[in-house]
Image (spheres, rainbow, N blue to C red):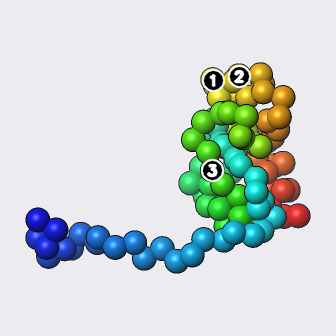
Amino acid sequence: MLKKLEELGIKLTNDKTGSVTEGNLTGKTFLFTGTLPTLKRSEAEAMVEANGGKILSGVSSKLDYLVAGEDAGSKLEKAKKISSVNIISEADFLRLIAQ
């Protein structure tokens, strides 16, 4: 079955080269919620990873930064209850990247 998939043009190997492990955001975790004013969420997540940070899938005490856009919902409410989570705007996020 795998050979047939390859013959049909399905790529079965991961060509992704090594990821960045050091940068402005090394050791920091991020989550995006709501609609960001200028960035697509995928772009913002790629910026985090390119600068050594990691993306989390949910709000927890392991989260360092929640970037909240317009119409942020339950993730923002949950993050407000965890004192260690820094809730920032897209502009604040872009300043972190630029440091």
Residue under numbered circle 2: 77
If the image is split into quadrants, where does the C terminus sit? bottom right
> Residue 98 lies in what quarter of the image?
bottom right
If the image is split into quadrants, where does the N terminus sit? bottom left
Q: Are marks 1 and 2 in contact (CB under 8 Å)?
A: yes
Residue under numbered circle 3: 55
Q: Which label lies toward us, 3 or 1?
A: 3
Mark 3 or mark 2: whose residue is earlier in sequence: 3
Distance (Cα) linking label 3 and label 1: 18 Å
Q: Amino acid at mark 1?
A: Ser
| Residue 57 located left or right of residue 54 | left
> Residue 83 lies in what quarter of the image?
top right
Q: Residues within 10 Å of mark 3 (few under 14, many from 20)?
A: some
Q: Give the residue displayed 70% in from the left and 58% down from the top.
A: 53
Q: Amino acid at mark 2?
A: Glu
Q: Are marks 3 and 2 in contact (CB under 8 Å)?
A: no
Q: Determine the secondary structure under disc 3.
A: strand
Residue 42 pos. (x, y %): 56, 54
Closer to us: 19 or 36: 19
Q: Residues within 10 Å of mark 2 (few under 14, many from 20)?
A: few
Q: Which label lies toward us, 3 or 2?
A: 3
Q: Amino acid at mark 3?
A: Ile
Residue 12 pos. (x, y %): 29, 70
Q: Is residue 26 visible?
A: yes
Mark 3 or mark 1: whose residue is earlier in sequence: 3
Distance (Cα) linking label 1 and label 2: 5 Å
Q: Give the residue displayed 70% in from the left and 47% down from the top.
A: 30
Q: Give the residue displayed 71% in from the left and 40% down from the top.
A: 62
Residue under numbered circle 1: 74
Distance (Cα) linking label 3 and label 2: 19 Å
Residue 58 pos. (x, y %): 60, 36
Residue 49 pos. (x, y %): 65, 62
